[in-house]
Image (cartoon, helix red, strand yellow):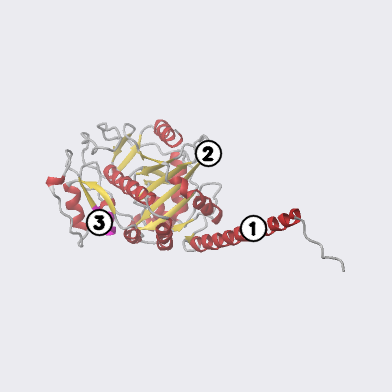
Amino acid sequence: MPSPKRRTPKKNKKRIALLVAIVLISIVAVVCAAFLALSLRYYFLMNYEERTQNSEGKFEIPEDELQSILDALPTDEPFEDETQEPALPPDTGEESHPQTPQTTAPTPPSTAGEPTDEPDVDDVTNILLIGADYVGDNGLSDIMVVVSINDTEKTVTCTSLMRDTYAYIPINQGVNKKLNAAHQLGGSELLIATIELNFGIKIDNYIKVDFEKAVQVFDLLGGLELRIDEAEVNFIRKWESSSTLTYDASKADADGFITVHLDGGELRAHARNRSTGGRGDFNRTRRQRDILYAAFEKCKTMSVPKLATLLENILPLVTTDISYAEFMSHVLSAPSYKSYQFETFRIPCDGYWKYWKYYVVVTDLEKTMEKWRDIVYN
């Protein structure tokens, strides 16, 4: 009786290699499917708001409706004589110059304006962060920060757009108002069109949250550590009834700042403070950038499980036009963001603005945006 054939070692190795390959492919497929399912779950936690691409950059609503909204806007009071501006607080990295009020009406920008030519556009993503008060249908966007992510230079630049900035709003025949009124008149789309028209910054996406939900966002972060002075402590105590903050002069640095832990309500009050330290909205936007920097630094130290839990709780609070593909791109890039350098800027920037009535007017847009591009694109 003939003996059975034995498999050669070479055939056994091929069989084992094939089985290992099948197992590995199966594991990768399962992991990819799980990651896809998880990312889809996170994505659909957000409130998605599709943005219509308005090629003409013009928005139309009935004239009586427009007038009704304009009439409901808060009454603005002219700025007091602020020809001698106090210096900015320390560590802002910004140069301060005395300014003189503008006495004649500024010329509105052309309605045919186009976003400024930007180098390496594909390497920079501009995301507009909107904080709105939601009084009425849309609310005034008192917080407007353009977050520019430069993947080539590995930087994240937060640029504050001051709410009092004089802007041409392209609705109906055109309206000259404060920049924050654009959101009240036409929501996120009109605000973005106004920013692109007035400053030439191409906005890729936006993320919006109202001030009440912002408190929840800050609390989910576990609060933040910030340097604040005595006047800022007193402002927070005044506007946030639950605050127990105290100013300990023995712990203050040479500039009078102490480091304190602020919860969500205290951070909201601090972000809206335009009353202390002089310079009104100039210092308020500085405080907002300080908060964003502290949040950015805190997130960099969080573990993956903590970040996942944070996302799960924060995403339902925001409204955005970020597509699933764009969301996935940011998710996959998230680990590398930890090494990115954080930069800040403000529009109008020092040296190129003047007061006119209750507006802050950009006096040299070309030089302002040149400085912005130098920081964002390095």
Return the residue found at the far bottom. Answer: 1
Residue 21 lies, in percent from the top left, at 66, 56
Residue 259 or residue 218, whichever sits in front: 259
Q: Residue beneath label 2, please?
A: 121
Query: Could you say which is closer to the camera, residue 134 or residue 371?
Result: 371
SS for callout 2: helix
Q: Which of 335 and 363 is in front in this view?
A: 335
Q: Is mark 1 on a helix, strand or loop?
A: helix
Residue in the image at 68% along x and 59% along y: 19
Earlier sequence position, callout 1 versus callout 3 = 1
Residue 265 covered by magenta stretch: yes
- Tag 1 residue: 25
User: Residue 220: within the magenta?
Assistant: no
Q: Within 10 angstroms of label 2, few (less than 14), some, or many (20 or more) residues?
A: few
- Residue indicated by mark 3: 266
Q: Specify the amino acid type for callout 2.
A: Val
Above or below: residue 359 compared with residue 261: above
Q: Quadrant of the N terminus?
A: bottom right
Residue type, label 1: Ile
- Where residue 159 appears, as percent x and y from the top left, is 38, 42
Q: Which of marks 1 and 3 is in front?
A: 1
Residues in magenta, as a range: 261-267
Q: What residue type is labelled 3?
A: Glu
Work out how far the residue at label 1 is from the one at label 3, CA to CA, in angstroms: 51 Å
* Distance between the alpha carbons at the discs numbered 1 and 2: 37 Å
